[in-house]
Amino acid sequence: MNQPNWLTKWTKPAHNWVGALALGALMLGPIHALADEVSNSASARDAVESAEPVLSYETSYNLIAAIKRYEQIVANGGWEEMSRGAFALKKGDDRGHVRALRRRLIASGDLEDSDRLSSEFDDELDAALRRFQARHGLHLTGVIDQETYLTLNVPAETKLAQLKLNLERVNQVVGELSNRYIVVNIPAASIEAVENGIVERRHTAIVGRIDRQTPILTSKVHEINFNPYWHVPKSIIRRDIIKYMNQDPNYLTDYRIKIYDANGEELDPQSIDWSTDEAVQYLFRQEPGAENSMGHVKINFHNPHAVYLHDTPQKSLFGQNRRFHSSGCVRVEDVDKLVSWLLRENETDWSLPAVDAAFDSGERMDVRLEQPVPIITTYITAWANRDGVVSFRSDIYGYDEVGRVDFASAE
């Protein structure tokens, strides 16, 4: 017997609807997995990025607690070395090396202990690995990539030595801290703006490369230069500009860098013998603008090293994991927000819109801080927060290796 027309009309859409649900379920699987991974990364960042400063009395107490924990880890035999078979492990894998990863992350406290060590790389393990990566300043990939693999295999004894050395570094400087200050932590390539013991702003930074290190010092920020000229240091003229001019005679013109003699007379770049060091005796000045190496702003503090904080036109570098690219000065991400924070005590309005307007104007302007703000550039490769989360960074300049704890002062 044939179905009535009205029944056919409604059963066909129902069949299609069931099929659509099945297809939707297949599509939602990867979407839910991605959402879990995003959530795991956010949780890892939240655990590490507390409001506690890297330099404070509380950091000292937290480091003492962390040292006790790691002494116990070392006493228990530390953790096993991950084999090369663990390389490229990621969520969804199911093999024996996953168990070794679980044991490693349990030993360092990133994963809760369990009587049953599954060989499945599940969401819980993904979250633990991302937490480990966050604690070590790595990209939160959830994958055993090269940097993660090498970091997992740093012995517990090395971590303990780092903690003890950095406790000395923190204790040496905390007595100098004021109510309001900024800290540049070189190994982390980060900046903290601190007030009343709380990190009010945290900025990603780019610091000096190994052969042109950012110096350790204390000083006070006293002046902001909006849309500055860049007076090229002689070291950069000697190391870089002479080389670039030999490769491309239009380099200075393209980057709007002018040359002046001792009398202030502008020179033609083609009049200089670039096969020699002749150029070092002249003044090189880059005009304000989009190509300017200091971007829209320079943040000045007195020091014998001629270093400063500044903006940069190379914003893409802030997304890198290892941000050691400068010639000693420090580039600041979201620098307009830091400038506004530094000038907050001035009578003139320097809210964020006012700072951005000054940037956009292109006008050269120097503004003195009515209340100079202390700045400390330091070298902290291990620290901890009150929740017991311990962070580590690579010994990029080799100071840990030689046990360096000194802090130079430049008032």
Image: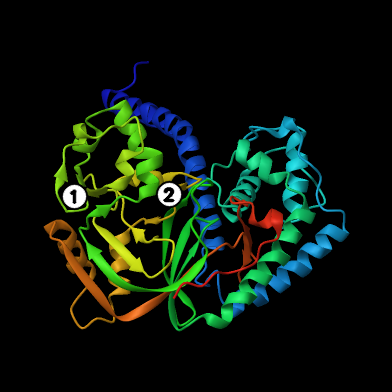
Q: Quadrant of the C terminus?
A: bottom left
Q: Quadrant of the N terminus?
A: top left
Residue 253 is situated, as x and y percent measured from the top left of the image, at 19, 36
> Which label sits on residue 327?
2
Q: Nearer the viewer, residue 105 or 27?
A: 105
Horizontal side of 355 relative to 40 (left or right) equals left
Q: Earlier in the sequence, mark 1 or mark 2?
A: 1
Which residue: 44% across, 53% down?
328
Q: Amino acid at mark 1?
A: Glu
Q: Amino acid at mark 2?
A: Ser
Q: Nearer the viewer, residue 235 or 375?
A: 235
Tag 2, which secondary structure?
loop
Q: Residues within 10 Å of mark 1 (few under 14, many from 20)?
A: some
Give the residue at mark 1.
Answer: 287
Q: Is residue 352 above or below residue 275?
A: below
Residue 90 is situated, as x and y percent measured from the top left of the image, at 62, 36
Q: Is residue 110 visible?
A: no
> Which label sits on residue 17?
none
Report, in whole angstroms, how far the alpha carbon at label 1 lies from the one at label 2: 19 Å
Q: Is residue 13 above or below residue 378?
A: above
Q: Is residue 94 visible?
A: yes
Q: Nearer the viewer, residue 141 or 263?
A: 263
Q: Is residue 355 above or below residue 212?
A: below
Give the image quarter of residue 362: bottom left
Horizontal side of 12 relative to 62 (left or right) equals left
Whether pointer 1 and pointer 2 mark residues with C-beta atoms closer than 8 Å, the reply is: no
Which residue: 53% across, 81% down?
176
